[in-house]
Image (cartoon, rainbow, N blue to C red):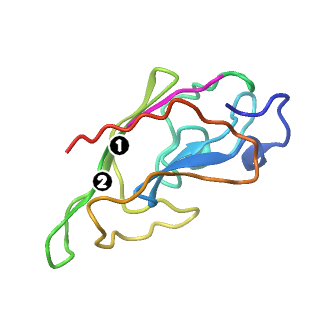
Amino acid sequence: MAPSPAKGTGQDRGNSGVFLMDLYEVQVLDCYGNTTYADGMTAAIYGQFPPAVNACRPPGEWQTYDIVFHRPRFETDGKLLAPARMTVFHNGILVHECAVLTGPTAHKARPPYKMHDAKLPISLQDHDHPVRYRSIWLRELE
């Protein structure tokens, strides 16, 4: 949930993120009546893909993010076998369908894939904004 009343503009308004494997981010941001760069708006696969639509609810209302993430696969020598893929629903609306990631997410950069463990943590980003989370469910697919 983004803070209410809303404070700030652009990236300085209800900013957070969900990091899968601590490398691949789905942006959490208050974009209800708030504009920012496309690949940094709410539910963007940060730095790579803007969402198909802005499905934000007003500040102070709970948002939902359903993220289906398939990790990248690597050969034993570190060569990329299959890139990471994501499907994202924001507030029940499909905003990314099987998006193929170019590597880890970053601001104004496209870092290449580097071999990493098959299991790494999920984390919630802290941008010093009082964004709240609840009912986080994880289900291993593979």
Label 1 Cα neighbours within 10 Å, binned few <14 / some 14-19 / many ≥20: some
The tag on residue 4 is none
Q: Position of 130 compared to 70: left or right? A: right
Label 2 Cα neighbours within 10 Å, binned few <14 / some 14-19 / many ≥20: some
Q: Could you give the CA–CA distance between mark 1 and mark 2, rounded to whole angstroms?
A: 7 Å
Depth order, front residue of 108/87: 87
Depth order, front residue of 140/50: 140
Give the total of numbered labels. 2
Q: In the picture shown, does residue 39 fall above or below 116?
A: above
Residue 86, horizontal then vertical, whole percent: 35, 43
The residue under label 1 is which amino acid type? Met
Q: In the picture shown, does residue 51 fall above or below 100?
A: above
Depth order, front residue of 103/73: 73
Residue 35, horizontal then vertical, whole percent: 72, 38
| Secondary element type, mark 2 | loop
Q: Quadrant of the C terminus?
A: top left
| Secondary element type, mark 1 | strand
Residue 130, horizontal then vertical, whole percent: 75, 42
Kindly identify the residue that appears in the image at 53 percent across and 62 percent down: 106
The tag on residue 84 is 2
Kindly identify the residue that appears in the image at 21 percent across and 76 percent down: 78
When asked about the image quadrant of residue 112, the answer is bottom left
Kindly identify the residue that appears in the image at 46 percent across and 20 percent down: 92
User: Is residue 106 located in the magenta-colored stretch of the structure?
Assistant: no
The tag on residue 86 is 1
Kindly identify the residue that appears in the image at 37 percent across and 62 percent down: 103
Q: In the picture shown, does residue 81 fall above or below 11?
A: below
As drawn, the residue found furthest toward the bottom would be 77
Q: Which residues are magenta?
A: 62-67
Residue contact at pointers 1 and 2, CB within 8 angstroms: yes
The residue under label 2 is which amino acid type? Ala
